[in-house]
Image (cartoon, rainbow, N blue to C red):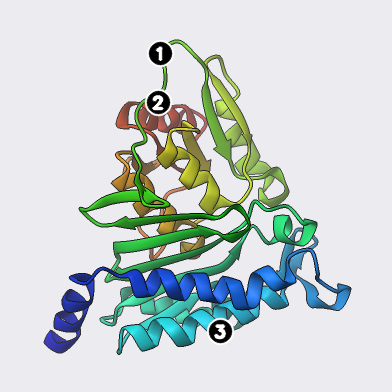
Amino acid sequence: MAHTVHTLDTFLAGDLNEVEEAVRKAAAAEILPRFRQLAADEIVEKNGPHDLVTVADRRAEEHLTASLTALLPGSVVVGEEAVHADPALLGALTDEAPVWIVDPVDGTRQFVAGDPGFATLVCLAHRGELLASWTYAPALEQMAVARRGAGATLNGVPLRSGSPEPGRDLDVAISHYDFTTDEEKRVLAALLTDGVTPRPCGSAGLEYLRVAQGLLDGLAFSWENPWDHAAGLLLVAEAGGASGTVAGEPFRIAGGNALPFSAARDETTLRHILDLLASAG
């Protein structure tokens, strides 16, 4: 165990540029060449017509699994596609080994539609603690990086979420209606109130980036897949934002959270969103 921690500490003490390069290479090799070039047989439904996977998702995750574990010996990958095939892999989130949490193409529906609003999400975690993250939108040429305790950047420029302008409606992205149950829709409808303008989310990773940029005031999500949230939660936190669950607890990346949960530009906005959601419980 001591050897694992020492290796992780040494790794984190570096500049981590090799991770960013690995993310860029995976996108360049497996994602961008297939953007707007997918054949019909390269798109498959997973759990329904809105839940899609493509050859780009699978190949990019395989590429990242090989490159990231090579960069940090002893680490493991919890990736969306691998977990779909073997849900037991989620147990690695609470094991001793450092974990790379990977969503190879976040926003697959956008990717399939030829919309550039998709991203590759990577987060390094250890025993539930988020340590570093990369949010890469290759078609938009955006790379956001966050390191625990060291801030967040977008294309090398520091990110600060700031606070919403007083007196205007809060812009809040919520779980997309296509992916929510009737009960989840009922709870999220609590945000349809004076002073809040909710809308369905696109790529979760890019919505988190908008919060970190101060372009979106908050999020309210009703699902907890770690690959959708890990990178963005750290990005928002390091940009000065806040997050928490409807029970008033920190979001646990390993699951078992009271839902929905929220991330927002500042603590005051977070509390307001969570209070509204709790009122519908």
Q: Is there any visible trace of residue 260 in the rendered image?
A: no
- In space, the residues marked 3 and 1 are separated at their CA atoms by 46 Å
Q: Residue at x 37, y 52 (%)?
A: 156
Which mark is drawn over residue 272? 2
Nearest-to-viewer mark from 2 and 3? 3
Q: Under tag 2, what secondary structure?
A: helix
Circles 2 and 3, Cβ within 8 Å, touching? The answer is: no
- Percent x, y for residue 185? 64, 39
Which amino acid type is marked by label 3?
A: Glu
**What SS does tag 3 mark?**
helix
In the picture provided, is 167 more to the left or to the right than 52? Answer: left
Q: Disc 3 or 1, which lies upstream in sequence?
A: 3
- First of labels 2, 1 by sequence position: 1
Q: Return the residue nearer the eye: 249 or 269.
A: 269
| Amino acid type of the residue tagged 2 in the rendering | His
- Identified at 72% across, 58% down, the residue is 109
Residue topped by disc 3: 62
Residue 110 image position (x, y, % from top left): 71, 55
**Residue located beneath label 1 in the image:** 166
* Pointer 2 or 3: first along the chain: 3
Within 10 angstroms of label 3, few (less than 14), some, or many (20 or more) residues? some
The quarter of the rendered structure image containing the N terminus is bottom left
Badge 1: residue crowd in 10 Å (few <14, some 14–19, many ≥20): few
Q: Is residue 119 above or below residue 193?
A: below
Which residue lies at the image location 41% right of the left edge and 28% below the top edge?
Answer: 275
Q: Quadrant of residue 37?
A: bottom right
Residue 120 seen from this side: yes
Q: CA distance from mark 2 to mark 1?
A: 13 Å
